[in-house]
Amino acid sequence: MSALLRSHISPASHAAPRAVLAVIEGNRTRDEDGDLDALDAIGTTLRVAKNAALFHEGELSEHVYQVVGGAMRTCRLLVDGRRQIADFILPGDFFGLDWQTTHGFTAEALTDAVVISYPRRRLEALAESRPAVQRLLMAMLCKGLAATQEHVVMLGRQTAYERLAWFLLRIKERSGGTDAVDVPMSRQDIADYLGLTIETVSRGISEFKRRQYISAISTHQFRLTDMMALQSLASGEAAA
């Protein structure tokens, strides 16, 4: 880890919280709680400053991470200098689960963020002996694969406004399903995720406000006021 990176990442003063409890649904047995206690025991909580990189593309992949506060983005710079954002990582989400030798993307903090770092080798060993940990990791892998497939379809087939509607609905779903949606990303972040220009994203947001699909609560928070219209647009059923 470089000195520059180290200056933007610091251990948090408190122990790793039981954030994984929100991921595993249903009633847990005593054995399952013990499995999660063992997972907590190998985690180290880190604070990552806004816009700092937790790791860079090409670096050795030695840890798996979970966001417990703030938000992260995974991205890659193309040879011509353009940036493609692969995903936004929100509280509760795991990342770095691709099990490759090196990282395929750079992970940066969208906001001041808090993440739990799990040593990969210890996590693999724990998953072999603790069924609840194994199920958790499998669920996170399946969730990540499904999100990647949706992203590919969106980039390949949807119009600009369909992409923006899909994005708002996905953030709503991942944020707990309320009509008031927190969007910690900048307009440029959204554009780089949707494969659009920042001007197109800004025009789309303005047009959605004009059509009363959404209303602005603050710079980074929207209320989705016409869910049916957004769902119809995102699915391609309505003209953009």
Image (spheres, helix red, strand yellow):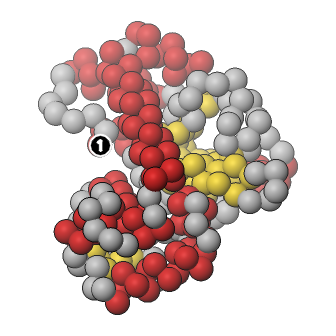
At mark 1, the secondary structure is helix
Q: Residue at x 27, y 26 (%)?
A: 33
At a point 76% along the width and 35% down the height, the residue shown is: 59
Q: Position of residue 52 (x, y in %)?
A: 70, 58
**Furthest residue toward left:** 27
Can you tell which quarter of the image residue 166 is in?
Answer: bottom left
* For residue 89, side relative to residue 213 (left or right): right
Amino acid, disc 1: Ala
119 and 23: which is toward the camera: 23
Most extreme residue toward the right, as rendered?
3
* Towards the viewer: 185 or 5: 185
Q: What x and y, as percent, mark residue 99?
A: 59, 24
Q: Residue at x 73, y 41 (%)?
A: 57
CA neighbours of label 1 inside 10 A, class few (<14), some (14 to 19), many (20+): few
Whether 210 is drawn above or below 56: the answer is below
Res 175 seen here: no
Position of 4 with respect to 214 (left or right) is: right
Side of 188 where 218 appears, left or right: left
Q: Quadrant of residue 179?
A: bottom left
Please tell me how many numbered marks the rendered image carries: 1
| Residue 117 in picture, x, y percent from top left | 57, 37
Question: Does 43 appear above or below 155?
Answer: above
Q: Compared to 31, does 53 lie above or below?
A: below
Q: Residue furthest bottom?
A: 210
Observer able to see residue 135: yes
When the figure is inspected, residue 138 is found, relative to residue 22, above or below; the finding is: above
Question: Which residue is located at x 79 percent, y 41 percent?
Answer: 1
Q: Quadrant of the C terminus?
A: bottom left
Q: Residue pushed farthest top? A: 129
Report x, y in % for residue 219: 46, 83
Judging by the rendered image, the residue that carries numbered circle 1 is 22
